[in-house]
Image: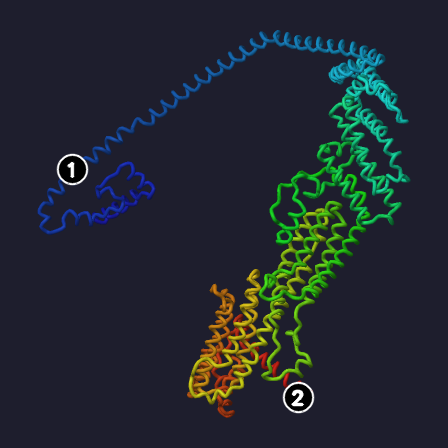
Amino acid sequence: MMEEEDLEFVEELEAVLQLTPDVQLAIEQVFPSQDPLDRADFNAVEYINTLFPTEQSLANIDEVVNKIRLKIRRLDDNIRTVVRGQTNVGQDGRQALEEAQKAIQQLFGKIKDIKDKAEKSEQMVKEITRDIKQLDHAKRHLTTSITTLNHLHMLAGGVDSLEAMTRRRQYGEVANLLQGVMNVLEHFHKYMGIPQIRQLSERVKAAQTELGQQILADFEEAFPSQGTKRPGGPSNVLRDACLIANILDPRIKQEIIKKFIKQHLSEYLVLFQENQDVAWLDKIDRRYAWIKRQLVDYEEKFGRMFPREWYMTERIAVEFCHVTRTELAKIMRTRAKEIEVKLLLFAIQRTTNFEGFLAKRFSGCTLTDGALKKLESPPPSTNPFLEDESTPEMEELAMEKGDLDQPKKPKAPDNPFHGIVSKCFEPHLYVYIESQDKNLGELIDRFVADFKAQGPPKPNTDEVGAVLPSCADLFVYYKKCMVQCSQLSTGEPMIALSTIFQKYLREYAWKILSGNLPKTTSSSGGLTISSLLKEKEGSEAAKFTLEELCLICSILSTAEYCLATTQQLEEKLKEKVDVSLTERINLTGEMDTFSTVISNSIQLLVQDLDAACDPALTAMSKMQWQNVEHVGDQSPYVTSVILHIKQNVPIIRDNLASTRKYFTQFCIKFANSFIPKFITHLFKCKPISMVGAEQLLLDTHSLKMVLLDLPSIGSQVVRKAPASYTKIVVKGMTRAEMILKVVMAPHEPSVVFVDNYIKLLTDCNTETFQKILDMKGLKRSEQSSMLELFRQRLPTPPAGPEASSSLSLLAPTPEQESSRIRKLEKLIKKRL
């Protein structure tokens, strides 16, 4: 029973002493210890085993028990001391709390005393400063009153003096006094409710009104409408009156300027009336000479009378321009039938020259004043009279080199006077456009006649492969017309001119380029009855002569030049025309026309070389390859093909030296045409013996090497062929080699032959497999079993996206299409 009670006590003690992990961790941090007895997971059995690991160690058990008892007594003493020390802790804490509360109450009392003293101090300061503030307000009000009284005295005296001086026309003194009076009057705006102040303000306004009327009367007297001027010329009184006009209502200034300019130009309206001979366009120089004399006369007589900031000289010139534009527009509407191109261009040239003169002399600041409206700013470099502008010779040279974007000198600033007079000519520019249409038509006809007279470029001359001279002449003329028209107008006339350009670019492409390409007996796009009737197997196809080859290359180079220059021309037209009209400039159709000429030229060169190789390929297909007994050098038909290539390609390459990319296109198109044709003729070689297949393989390899070397054949400088071209040749000729390797392979066992075919050609087309069986010379019965086996051995087409790629293998190849066309030709011949 005692043992059970002891166990229960131990369990209860362990339950009481079980601490949470957080508390245990805090104890370990405050009282770190390495003693196993202090560990939370203390195990008595393990501890005893540690003390007595062996039986021999039990000999000193008494000593260990004594140490543990001593340790227990020390712990009991420590616990007893701590418990006794905590007996009075609660009482001490309450005492400390009471002391703290007393201290807080004392502190609160002291703070309240300080606040009361601060309020008393603030009240004392307010009482001390109350009198000082009153003195400050009194001083400020007194100062304001004195200042206002002074201003009032100045205003009253100034108004009296202003009225007296106005009556005596002392404008010099009035100009200074009036400005001061108006400045003083601004201080009394908030006092307008006072009758005396309002009366003074009304007197000032009346004085201003009287001054304005008086000054206008003085100017009317000095410069009457009849045009008679004062004998003594401009006086100091009028000069001072202008200074007053600057201060008065701006309408007074505008009225003075308007009347003076009208009086100054009244003589002009009489001299150049619509019914006078000098009013017509052929004497337009006299208008501009008259105004130049008037401006010089004004500077001498009246230059000092008007203030500089009025810009009277420029205002006279601007008003003259407006009057002249109106008068010229009126007379041109009346005599529109008499306007000729040369007369119109003469008048425009003189007018733009005069506008350039105005731009050099004046700033154009008055064009935005009042009713004077600033005209549209011209596009850059439209002023033909700027000293730093490029000369026509330099522009023509740039056009001949095909570089419209050649760097030019910095452009002069825009002319603010551009179009201020010349705008009146714009409705009549249709005369100029019609003239350019006629001139360009005659120019194209002359190009056609010159080409027929001179003939194509002669071989072994500098003309070979060069751009036709007529092309450079055409674009130089275009450049001249574009610059000239942009000086006349940047609006609808430029759109009309671009339409004319488009028309004759197409005519040049049709009449000069396409019209002079050598003709072929049949087109590449299809078959004609005549070509089928004339076609004979093995007949020598008609080839282009050396002159014709050079002509085709020259036309190709010219078309390329036209294509590049037309693109630059479109960009320049968009720069010259108004921004709102740029979308209407579009030469894409003309550029496509020149691209078509280039494609047709390349196709003619390819057809010519292709046709030259046809007899050799026909000879290859007619050879008895089953009778070949030994493999020798390359066959004669290969030599013939190589000979034609060496004859044509160097000529074409040399003539297209300036357009390498189109020579590369020629090579690619020839390879794409020749290789499928060669494979088609290869299938016609049947039956073929083993030796014959080896000979054909040797020939195919020779042709492959020649084709790979085609771009640089016959050239002293060997260049690496373009990668795109090499890829086409390697792919096509490798297929031909694989076909011959399949033919050379034994057809027994059949499974191995079929698998070898599928592996080498990756061709799932039964028609191609049938042709190879024909080339091997197998009987129909053997072919049937082979075809059945071939269909069984075909790989199953994958499902999903890859199915389309596998189905594409079943599509007809180029050689199959060519074979079908041949069959169709034979069928048509039999029917005919």
User: In x, y percent, where is residue 642?
Assistant: 51, 75
User: In x, y percent, where is residue 798?
Assistant: 50, 74
The residue wearing badge 1 is 70
Quarter that holds the C terminus: bottom right
Q: Secondary structure at mark 1?
A: helix
Task: Identify the residue at horizontal 80%, vertical 38% (top origin).
Answer: 285
Q: Nearer the viewer, residue 250 or 525?
A: 525
Q: Nearer the viewer, residue 310 or 594?
A: 594
Among the two numbered marks 2 and 1 on one chain, the one whose residue lies closer to the N terminus: 1
Q: Is residue 795 left or right of residue 446?
A: left
Task: Identify the residue at horizontal 61%, vertical 73% (top origin).
Answer: 544
Q: Is residue 643 left or right of residue 474?
A: left
Question: Does residue 541 appear in the picture of this structure?
Answer: yes
Q: Does residue 32 sit above or below 454 in this rendering?
A: above
User: In x, y percent, where is residue 246?
Assistant: 77, 22
- Residue type marked 1: Leu
Local crowd at mark 2 within 10 Å, few (<14), some, or many (≥20)? few
- Residue type marked 2: Lys
| Closer to viewer: mark 2 or mark 1 | 2
Instruction: Give the CA distance from mark 2 to mark 1.
Output: 135 Å
Q: Nearer the viewer, residue 118 or 499?
A: 499
Indicate how the structure is coloured in the image. Answer: rainbow
Q: Secondary structure at mark 2?
A: helix
Q: Which mark is residue 830?
A: 2
Q: Does residue 89 sit above or below 582 in this rendering?
A: above
All told, the count of numbered labels is: 2
